[in-house]
Image (cartoon, helix red, strand yellow):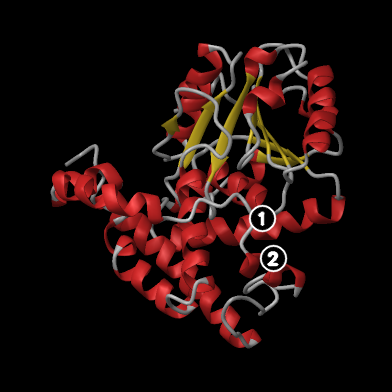
């Protein structure tokens, strides 16, 4: 593995929030060296214990062998500045969706890194062509959209911009595969990429159904969970149509598609939730009522479920059926 990793290590990481800690844990769990930087030194230090817990849990859940994490602290270093990422062979930027902030970081990276070092952004919606515009070496910029929890999920989207080189794409896909992902490579840059575009179309329709009085929140959730949620780990929408009969879908589309919500406005129910300060289980205030204990139980249920789904997804990997 070391020879295979040579062109990718050490991996630089900028941002050690929720996503960044997960990415660091994933990289370390797969034997890679990591140099990480966060603007707030306190958060950077706090990330170490989070990473330790994540790695131990991966071992406990039998997703990685204990031998893989035994020397992880020897392979992890906190940097005091972006300039200290100079030795890195691949850098992942995972800061908030702030275009100006990302551009400031890229300017510093361009001064610190060799010209052949890939710079991958863990953006969830910003077009990569925008991020690479006016850069000194735009060919090395690429999107690398991780899922949450990053250390568990097989999900990873790789998005080239208009000027991204084939070499950059090759190295990014290789890193994803080394990290145990099933990377999805987009053929062209599009805002929101693949999964977010499908997810937000679904969320918009869910909000519309509630706002229109068709059903309440719990009913919409139940219907979705017991239908799409039942089969989606095994099959995507095209495989599902193969499994259940293509002609029926074409017939339904003709009458149903014109009836679906296509507004470009943020749904009223979403605006009201945000205005009221709701953050979900993060502050025990969301679409559902929570006590603090209830929010913790849901957080644990999500973690347990994620590990079980990962095992199931590995068992029913579509590439092996």
Residue 2 at least partly seen: no
Q: Earlier in the sequence, mark 1 or mark 2?
A: 1
Residue found 61% across the figure and 34% down from its top? 33
Residue 45 in percent (x, y) is at: 79, 54
Q: Nearer the viewer, residue 226 or 18?
A: 226
**Secondary element type, mark 1:** helix
Q: Is residue 111 above or below residue 53?
A: above
**Secondary element type, mark 2:** helix
Residue 147 at least partly seen: yes
Q: In the rendered view, does 29 fall on the left or right side of 75?
A: left
Cα–Cα gap, marks 1 and 2: 24 Å
Closer to the eye: label 1 or 2 = 2
The 10 Å Cα crowd at callout 2, few under 14, some 14 to 19, many 20 or more, is few
Per the image, the residue denoted by label 1 is 18
- Is the N terminus in the top left, top right, bottom left or bottom right quadrant? top left
Per the image, the residue denoted by label 2 is 271
Q: Is residue 186 above or below residue 79?
A: above
**Which quadrant holds residue 214?**
bottom left
């Amino acid at each position: 593995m070391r020879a295979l990793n040579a062109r990718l290590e050490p991996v630089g990481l900028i941002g050690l929030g929720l996503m960044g800690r997960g990415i660091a844990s994933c990289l370390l769990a797969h034997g890679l060296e990591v140099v990480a930087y966060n603007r707030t030194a306190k958060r950077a230090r706090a990330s170490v214990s989070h990473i330790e817990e994540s790695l131990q849990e991966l071992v406990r859940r039998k997703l990685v062998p204990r031998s893989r994490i035994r020397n992880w602290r020897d392979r992890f270093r906190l940097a005091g500045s972006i300039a200290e990422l100079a030795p890195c062979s691949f850098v992942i930027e995972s800061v908030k969706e702030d275009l100006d902030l990302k551009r400031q970081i890229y300017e510093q990276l361009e001064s610190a890194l060799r010209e052949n070092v890939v710079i991958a952004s863990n953006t969830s919606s910003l077009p990569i062509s925008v991020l690479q515009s006016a850069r000194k070496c735009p060919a090395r910029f690429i999107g690398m959209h991780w899922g949450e929890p990053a250390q568990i999920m097989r999900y990873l989207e790789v998005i080239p911009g208009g000027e991204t080189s084939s070499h950059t794409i090759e190295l990014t896909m290789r890193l994803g595969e080394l990290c145990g992902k099933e990377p999805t490579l987009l053929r062209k840059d599009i805002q929101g990429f693949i999964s977010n575009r499908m997810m937000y179309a679904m969320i918009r329709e869910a909000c519309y159904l509630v706002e229109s009085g068709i059903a309440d929140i719990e009913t919409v959730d139940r219907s979705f969970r017991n239908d799409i949620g039942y089969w989606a780990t095994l099959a995507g929408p095209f495989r599902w149509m193969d499994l259940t009969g293509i002609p029926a879908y074409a017939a339904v589309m003709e009458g149903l598609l014109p009836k679906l919500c296509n507004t470009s406005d943020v749904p009223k129910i979403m605006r009201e939730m945000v205005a009221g300060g709701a953050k979900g289980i993060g502050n025990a205030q969301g679409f559902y009522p929570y006590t603090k204990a209830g929010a913790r139980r849901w957080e644990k249920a999500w973690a347990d479920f994620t590990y079980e789904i990962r095992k199931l997804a590995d068992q029913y990997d579509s590439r092996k059926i």
